[in-house]
Image (spheres, rainbow, N blue to C red):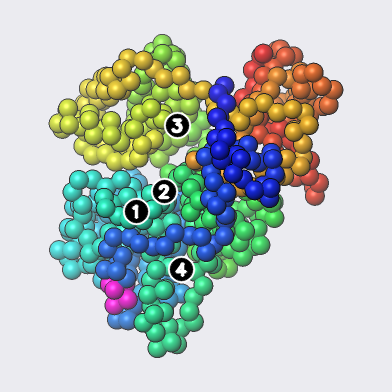
Amino acid sequence: MLTREIDQSLYESYSDDIPLFLKRIYAARGVSESQLSMALPGLLKPNFDQLNIALELLERCLIEDKRILIVGDFDADGATASAVAIRALRLMGAKYVDFLVPNRFKHGYGLSPEIVKEAKRDKEPDLIITVDNGISSNEGAALARSLDIDVIITDHHLPPNELPNANAIINPNLRGCDFPSKNLAGVGVSFYLFSSLKTHLAKQGYFEKNNIQNPDLRVLLDLVALGTVADVVKLDQNNRILVNEGIKRIRQKNCSKGILAILELTKRPIETLQASDLGFTVAPRINAAGRLSDISQGIRCLLSEDMNDARRYAQTLEEFNIKRRKEQTRMQDEALAIVESQAIDQSDFAIVLYDESWHEGVVGIVAGKLKETYQCPSAVFAKADDVLKGSIRSIPDVHIKDLLDLVDRDNPGLIEKFGGHAMAAGLTIKPQNFEKFKNAFTEAITRHLKGKKPIIELLTDGQLDLSEITFKNADLLRQASPWGQGFEEPIFYGDFELLEQRVIGEKHLKCNLKLQGTNSVLEGIAFFQEKLDSKKVRAAYKLNVNSFRGNESLQLMIESIESA
């Protein structure tokens, strides 16, 4: 285990308003006191390239009652971004606004020619707005423009060298874009566009002229929080403000009835909701619809204005999620068996697997599991008609999008298409090219790492004295949330005596621990952990406030535990 280094100058710069316990944690994350403010007025101003072009086009479409179609992505970020766009436009008086989300199995990703043809045939839009996709959709954008459909692309993915021929592109990662944060999720970009539109329309006197109440778009922040957490983007100050404000609204039940229905169904206490509840409870159920069927069920759940409708959609999403978990378990077990049969071990540089029976909507989760288990980039493929569709999850030392660029340049025609981020990517290859891709991919990673596999260790905030392992400090950490990617929740470690242990629920280990050299007994829980033989253990843990039947107590949320 590694311990974060504390920036001593930052530590000493903090005012006395910050508790000593938190000073250490903030200084280890390189965060200044001013960056800790979660006040909504602290949001960055929307200085995106091409924003004025998009606003003028949207204003014209609203005034002329044009048909506007939202084309999203089939994950939780795409679903929330779609819901934000639809609700915002309706609040601003749009009479004809609808959505169409690509079906993963039928259309593939993004604004493809297939989805444009379907949109033209079934929806007859005057304007298509993409959310959380489109930055690589050159063919689809060109087709839409040739059919006299205007196109606004809103996306956050890294742009290719050649950009689509859209009327306007709103993306913080466009080369030359001056927006200071490059970490917005797709839903964040969508929110910024429509917040800017509201400001623009207000300046033009649009709301007074059309007898429309000037909308308060803070009502959309619950959706922004959900999509931002679900997409695991870096929680810089701007994203933390968005997530914090959204979570406050959910705790007050001033939010989407769809979110409330999912929390109600999963018996999550709303008043103490944390970002992790969105990431591990709500988002997987939205995602399950896109993985196994059609994400439109998730979007309709989020758009529900009647609680009974929301509950029906939530139940449908729960059924999808149960099926997804079963399929995931089967595929993970089979993938791990293949890895063991091929004698792959911790020294291997990459894992590339394919099975004809695997479900294309679940390969990303399985790739993530393999990456975590073997600490190397992992690619998992499934059959999709006459091609193989794969999902890759990577490690910090390998920027997987850049590596696929390299493989593609060195092996023309090997990859049909691909896209992604530093840590995750998707691609399509022909079945006959699987072995060739496997070899080229593994060789490229081995070369990139110079034949030396990096050792990836758990990064912690060090050891705590018993006097620091308290409910008070656990509550301080809860109040300092939201935690997430780039602003990680503190993990501590220590050597303990394992006094008592029992397995509960789905293979979760409930235990009583005693910090070595002390007499106080602490309660802990480790998810998906078998019993240990040793009484002397080293555990990495988070300080957690456990709420049960109205009572709150300290609990160690154990991330890893092993014989000392």
Q: Residue at x 30, y 45 (%)?
A: 158
Which mark is first along the chain, 4 or 3?
4
540 inside magenta stretch: no
C-alpha gap between disc 1 and disc 4? 23 Å
Residue 207 visible somewhere in the drawing: yes
**Which residue is denoted by mark 2 in the rendering?**
183
Residue labelled with disc 4: 87
Sequence-earlier tag: 1 or 4: 4
Q: Quadrant of residue 506?
A: top right
| Picture disc at residue 368 | 3
Based on the displayed image, in which of its 4 quarters is residue 393 positioned? top left
Q: CA distance from mark 2 to mark 4?
A: 23 Å
Could you say whether the residue bearing mark 4 is in a helix, strand or loop? Answer: helix
* Residue 251 placement (x, y as % from top left): 65, 58
Callouts 2 and 3 close, C-beta under 8 Å:
no
Instruction: Tell me the crowding category of disc 2: few under 14, some 14 to 19, or many 20 or more residues within 10 angstroms, Cα based.
Output: many
